[in-house]
Amino acid sequence: MTTTTSETRGGAVVPERKSVTQTTANWIDERTSISGLVRELGRKIFPDHWSFMLGEVALYSFIVILLTGTFLTFFFQASMAEVTYDGSYLPLKGIDMSAAMSSTLHLSFDIRGGLLMRQIHHWAALLFVASIGLHMLRIFFTGAFRKPRELNWVIGFVLFILALAEGFTGYSLPDDLLSGNGLRIIDGLVKGIPVIGTFTSYLLFGGEFPGTAIVGRLYTLHILLLPAILVAALGVHLLLLVINKHTQFAGPGKTNDNVVGVPIMPVFAAKAGGFFFIVFGVIVLMATFFTINPVWLYGPYDPSPISAGTQPDWYIGFADGALRLVPSGLGFQIGDFTFALNVFLPIVVLGLFIVLVAIYPFIESWVTGDKREHHIADRPRNAPTRTAIGAAGVVFYAVLWAAASSDLIATHFSLTVEGVILTLQILLIVGPIIAYLVTKRLCIGLQKKDREIALHGYESGRIVRLPGGEYIEVHEQLTDYERWRLVSFEDYKPLMLRPNAKGQISPLERARSVLSGWFFEDRITPVTTHELEQQHHAGHGALEGDSGTEIESGHH
Amino acid sequence: MRKSTDISPLARKPRKTGRRSPLASIALILIGLVATGGAYALFSTTASASTTAANQQLLTEGSKLFQANCATCHGMNLEGTQQAPSLLGVGAASVQFQVSTGRMPAAASGPQEEEKPSQFTDQQTLALAEFVGSKAVGPGIPSKQYLGGTGNAAKGAELFRINCAMCHNVAGAGGALTEGKYAPSLSGVSALHAYEAMITGPQNMPVFNDANITPSQKADIITYLKYLDKNPSPGGLDLGNLGPVSEGLFLWIFGLGAIVGVTIWLTAKAN
Amino acid sequence: MAQHDDGVTTPDSGAAGSPVGSTVALSSESGTGVVPLDSVENPGFPPHNPRQTNLDPKKDKNAERQVTFLFFLSIIGSVFALAAYMVFPIVPGDFGSIRENNLFLGLGITLGLLGIGLGAVHWAKQLMREDESVEYRHGTRGTEETRAKAVEVFELGDQESGFGRRTLIRNSLIGALVLTPVPAVALFRGLAPDTDPTALLNHTMWKKGVKLTHDPTGVPIKASDVTLGSAFHVIPEGLNQRSDALEQKAKAAVLLMRLQPEDLHVTKGRETWNYEGIIAYSQICTHVGCPVALYEQQTHHLLCPCHQSQFDMTHEARVIFGPARRPLPQLPITIDSEGYLIARSDFHEPVGPDYWERHV
């Protein structure tokens, strides 16, 4: 510790002791200029809303995955060399299996805490993908992907795909019966791709399925290539978050030009840091009490056995479900070649669905023609068409997901497998349409109700008798702060069809105009000051007259 | 029971010799011997049972019970009717399995007969089984030596995965079949019933005769099933052993549910 | 508003209702947004309601105690985990000991983590500064000045290098860059052997005279062993001795069943493929390759547990439900002089899922 002297204002010299923290901070700053970074970021404001924490859940489970995964690599052998198991699990003793499977059993049953680490790793992986999914839904339904965050949506989408890839490669590593059959399905899927399928599968497996290469290759992807890309993309994702600052929900005092919330130092740091430990704790709690992926029951991979209820982990379920919902007999032979439409169709449909999700921000901004920056998150009801599109997408995904457990649905609800599949086939087409229509009506209904409340206040439940003998219910007016949440959303008009410089209207522009009209039809306009004043005069504050609702229909 | 439980005449021909393939190793001969021995032991059980005097009474009781409870559907002489298959040749094992698990007498028609509380005492069930078994040769009640769970669990587990897991699931949790039928869960199923099911192939289950899975191999499978029953998962509760579906559902509902709960608490204003 | 030196302002409780000004225009274009002239005005920040811990020193003290307690709980948890590691080791041969090890170690770690987490959040919520702060946003795009500077940098770079001017250099560089990864791509051909995959997919281990044997023991099967209603899982004789056993098994696995001969609907040319009602079919699903082996002996249906394709074994495994497109290939079988089941030939078509080069 150094002792320096400094002059006080009075001129007297007093010795001043510098603490270890100060000295260390000084030492670091003199070599890194970190003080600039701390000044820049230390008091950054982060808005408080529960749904803003979902991305953090993903981040934290990823950290848990990195920590436990590192532990597992110290014991796992990514080799398909055949060994005879001689560990402590009796029902597999003396059975031939790959070194991968054998080392998985060894780290589960012969290393203290090994099973716990494996279970933490796997539960955290499931949580990782699930929280990314929920995070994406939050972003979508609040319109937080709009300018200037379209790029970050795409990066987040890439992270989601990487998480799926990480999940699938990890699931396949133990080389157990369940994951082996999963790989077999992948092999069949790849072979079904026209022209390049056979060779792609051949290269992937290093020869014929299953070969002796796949586990080692997936391991390299799982612990090196994919995590490296993931960490890099995550860095960009967070950097853009800092640059763009977080969105916030509309509220009194909150505008498109400010961020209202708690500073990173100390409140947000404490909450977010504490939240990391809570997420970690919840994952460990699950791993303590609930078995996940009991590979010892599945046994080593062998091409002829299979277990009833063979399913992938939940996040691949939608793809497995898509395979199940294909109707019989699709595909044909042309000349010397076979076109496996029953396999290729789901690949194409899922591919299209995924691409649509990835580029949705660009589609919406093209359709709406909205080029402004948006920092106020929409309430889902205030963007009825987008919310309805999202609901349709969710239903489409959910039906595919449910289809992956068609057999378990059948056994647990005493139905027939055939009936369940037929129902889901119909739902896959009809479900999203119904979801779209219902959600849109629901949103508009909620908007109308908001408008009613903003204008006339809440129903107080208090009944008053008027001098004329008439009974009416007193409506409680809102405060300005309460009302602001209901009225502060933006109104849009559909794009006007305008000829270009040559005086022509291109078909693309025409389509855009039609889509824009569809996107903004049936919109409810926010309450204006004028309407409020009118209402105030008509109702004299407390008592409601019958002024009806002012709803503007978008068909003009 | 439907027509399927009848056994072809080929199965009933007792094999007098072990396998003598020129390629067979000593191990194969051993397995063959065990198989033959097992089959012999089985058939001799049935044969000797029908001879003793004490059993004559049992057969009479069985006959009465059969006329009263089974004959309407299966015919007075076990020949079968429009509603139900012939019971000639199904063997005592089949009757004991069907009756003591409550699947017979049949309940209202569904996709398949369900397990329910048995309507008969063990003694009555045995009487019925011996009576049916005495009418034509079929798989007899298995010998106790295969039911003790003293076989090789590892071999049993391997055989289980190859022959049973595709319907009953690797953990014996059961699974779906076509048109509403299902393979039941095997957890808690007694060794006797497991053996009898293998050898008789109730309803849509295929028959696993002693040439397919030898009695000692069946004993291995039973040993594995007992091991599963006795040793709960070391990783904690097993969520029904339904695989990734139950894990995914649990994660979404409870795992993510708990965490979303925490986020709400975390961002709520302190009062 | 209190102005902090870092540009962050804090709305004091007294400043409630103060107007919220706009600082920077976020974009030059407005798009299709409609801003009515008489839209309701933002009422500004609401008055601040202080929390209990600020009003009541006793509650403040309580919260402090709770946070400390939670942190202590975490310490206890971590110590407990360490103790559990030693007290509950894995005892070889005792399967239950793994469960105890997992349980108690997990409990300790959980407590250690949740104690810190809950404590920190509780601290932040109850004892740290609670009022909200405001930070202003600026348009994401750089200022005109910065953008002009950036353009200038590029122009200078272009001028000084001659990138735009010396087109020959530039284009040849682009060409070179495009080509450099090509050798790397070619290297990946080495992922698989040089042999042609389609030739491998066309054949299995089965050929004339190969015995049908039990999976996994490799014991040959006699026709007399296969009784009505039986289902045998079959591998070709000699499979277990091969070094590529798994690859061969993945193509050659067969399910053997016996039906009443009169239940079989045999097409022309396949009359000799079954032996007295004993039929052998490839176990590999023609959809995406799962083993299909859920044989129902009464309905004679075969179900795939992966994607629920169903095959009717009385009609040569034709597809009756599900995504599969083709019937399962049949293995022609007969018996040898000793009564053992043998193959008459290989499958007459490639087994398993469709692939591009597949043709019959």
Image (cartoon, rainbow, N blue to C red):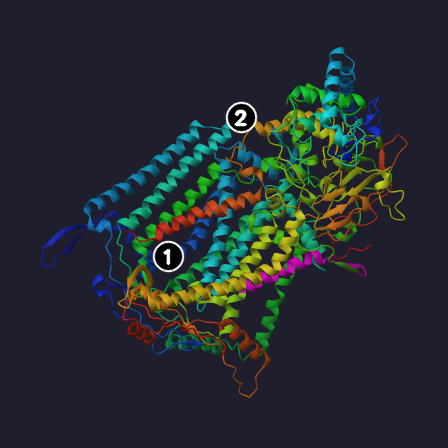
Instruction: Give the crowd class for mark 1: few <14, some 14-19, many >=20 residues within 10 Å.
Output: some
Q: Quadrant of residue A548?
A: bottom left
Counting from the top left corner in percent of width and height, residue A288 is at 46, 37
Counting from the top left corner in percent of width and height, residue A28 is at 32, 53
Residue farthest toward the top in the current orientation of the protein: B53
Instruction: Give the crowd class for mark 2: few <14, some 14-19, many >=20 residues within 10 Å.
Output: few
How would you classify the magenta stretch by its main secondary structure? Answer: helix
As rendered, which of C103 and C164 lies closer to the eye? C103
Camera sees residue A19: yes
Residue depicted at x 52% and y 44%: A122
Secondary element at tag 2:
loop
Camera sees residue B30: no
Counting from the top left corner in percent of width and height, residue B47 is at 79, 17
Residue corresponding to mark 1: A49
Residue type, label 2 = Pro
Tally of numbered tags: 2
Residue depicted at x 73% and y 16%: B58
Q: Quadrant of residue B190?
A: top right
Distance (Cα) linking label 2 and label 1: 50 Å
Q: Is A225 within the magenta?
A: no
Counting from the top left corner in percent of width and height, residue A130 is at 50, 51
As rendered, which of B201 and A459 lies closer to the eye? A459
Q: Which residues are magenta?
A: A334-358
Residue corresponding to mark 2: C92
Residue type, label 1 = His
Q: Are marks 2 and 1 on the same chain?
A: no
